[in-house]
Image: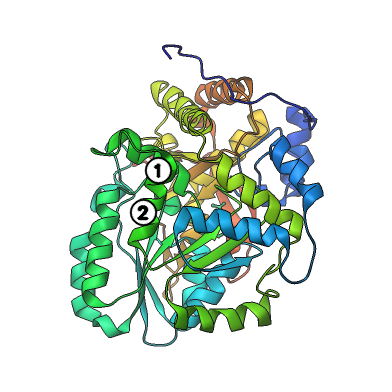
Amino acid sequence: MGFKTIIEPFKIKVVEPIRITTPEEREMHLKDAGYNLFGLKADHVIIDFLTDSGTSAMSDRQWSGIMLGDEAYSGSKSWIRMREAIYNLTGYPYIFPTHQGRAAERIVYGALGGKGKVFISNTHFDTTRANIEVTGAEAIDIPVPEASDTALNKPFKGNMDVGRLKELISKHGKENIGAVILTVTNNSSGGQPVSMQNAKEVGALCRLNGIMFILDCCRIAENAYFIKRDEKGFEDMTYKEIATQMFSLADASVMSAKKDALVNMGGFFAMHDKAFADKCRESLIIGEGYITYGGLSGRDMEAIATGLEEVFDPDYLNYRIKSTAYLGNKLHQKGIPVMMPIGGHAVYIDAKKFYPHIPVENFPGQALACELYLKGGIRSCEIGSVMFGHTDNKGKFVPAAMELVRLAIPRRVYTQSHIEYVIEVFDKLLEDREKVSGYKITEAPRYLRHFTARFEKTGVKMSVSGGR
Ligand code: F0G
């Protein structure tokens, strides 16, 4: 207590070397990748902030569990441990393993979806939306209005707009709502947390109308940290108790274990309702595997059981949230337009404000992501018009709502000095920000173009009116 320095609450037992590339090498690698960071070899990256998913460092306890993994096809000891860990945390009687989050989504939304159904969320993550839309159903996002004000420093900007939820229920009819989904924390909206009050209000409205309420809970431990810190009445509860309370409000949950279960692969879904569980069980066996492994090895399940315990350790969560905030607040102090407040797993930069001279049709977010790599070997992810923009049927460019770049921080992987290095790289970016040009797409597939599109630089174009 009382110290400013955030020390990592772990010691390093195994190391993975980072190859330090030169600016000339990076220029060549990025050009070869068509200026798309997904196309880079990971070995050519110095600091990899592409995602926090599946990139955690496991603990010595988790690694020793790997040797204890029981690979029995049915009734594996490791499954029983994983099921118990999930039951203790969530209280759901029906629990099913999957190989990752989107597999659980495919099964759950496959069972609930279909033409004419509507799903409502604070914000659907893209795989959630895709798994809903593929059934012919519609997915509607209703974050609170303040979510889109990136500079507004207010807690719980990840909440769902309950007023809009009421309107949508009466507009579409409760019988046509497949489910209401609360994503905690709200990844696609800045990694902002959801308050318990909001979850209670959403849950009450769903119960009143007989609508299924689902938690997308992959970052629920991080969310619990914010509730304990910022919401009245939770100061004396443990992080795990807070998470358990949130689970008790929902009918079912879907989890990508690649986030807050501190593992490299895995997921699950769980629920109270037997008839719903029976329907999902069938689809699990057809697509993923038998109900006691669902696409996972016994050793993966062992690691998940341990990870779900470790993630609620107060020292870990304190380090996790404070070190993410350290990076975000340092950038904020330098005048870099970061989304405020800093969320749990990532720092989001508003690239439209950082490069106001680059028009949105030339992708300021892509320009920022490329500069971070060229100057410092940092890999980030554009979440803007490359990902969500499109050309309408009249040939007009329709930009995304925001041009963000996400620095997603892997759990327990980087140290304070890596973070200090990242902050220094931003100083370099500030030195010549007016000279940076935008990009144009030279090749792109029809769907999910951000993964494989190729780009070229437009050359510096100083638009007098500035970006939109
Ligand atoms: N839900 C949320 C809120 C997510 O963030 C993700 C994945 C998923 C579901 C899907 O889980 O990857 O295990 O199939 N998010 C990653 C990211 C990919 O980078 O934010 P998955």
The answer to whether residue 20 is seen in the rendering is yes
The answer to whether residue 352 is seen in the rendering is no
Q: Is residue 368 shown above or below 172? A: above
Which quadrant is the N terminus positioned in? top left
Q: Position of residue 192 (x, y in %)?
A: 38, 45
Quarter of the displayed picture in which ligand 1 can be seen: bottom right
Corner quadrant of residue 335: top left
Q: Position of residue 324 (x, y in %)?
A: 49, 32
- In depth, the one of 201 and 84 nearer the eye is 84
The reply to whether discs 2 and 1 touch (Cβ–Cβ < 8 Å) is yes
Residue at image location 77% in from the left, 41% down from the top = 64
- In depth, the one of 156 and 215 nearer the eye is 215
Residue at image location 65% in from the left, 42% down from the top = 56
Give the residue number, with chain letter if any, for mark 1: 224
Q: Is residue 201 shown above or below 133? A: above
Q: Which mark is residue 200?
A: none
Q: Is residue 153 left or right of residue 335?
A: left
The residue positioned farthest toward the bottom in the image shown: 115
Q: Earlier in the sequence, mark 2 or mark 1?
A: 1
Under mark 2, the amino acid is Met
Under mark 1, the amino acid is Ala
Residue at image location 38% in from the left, 68% down from the top = 251
Q: Is residue 351 shown above or below 393? A: above
Give the residue number, with chain letter if any, for mark 2: 246
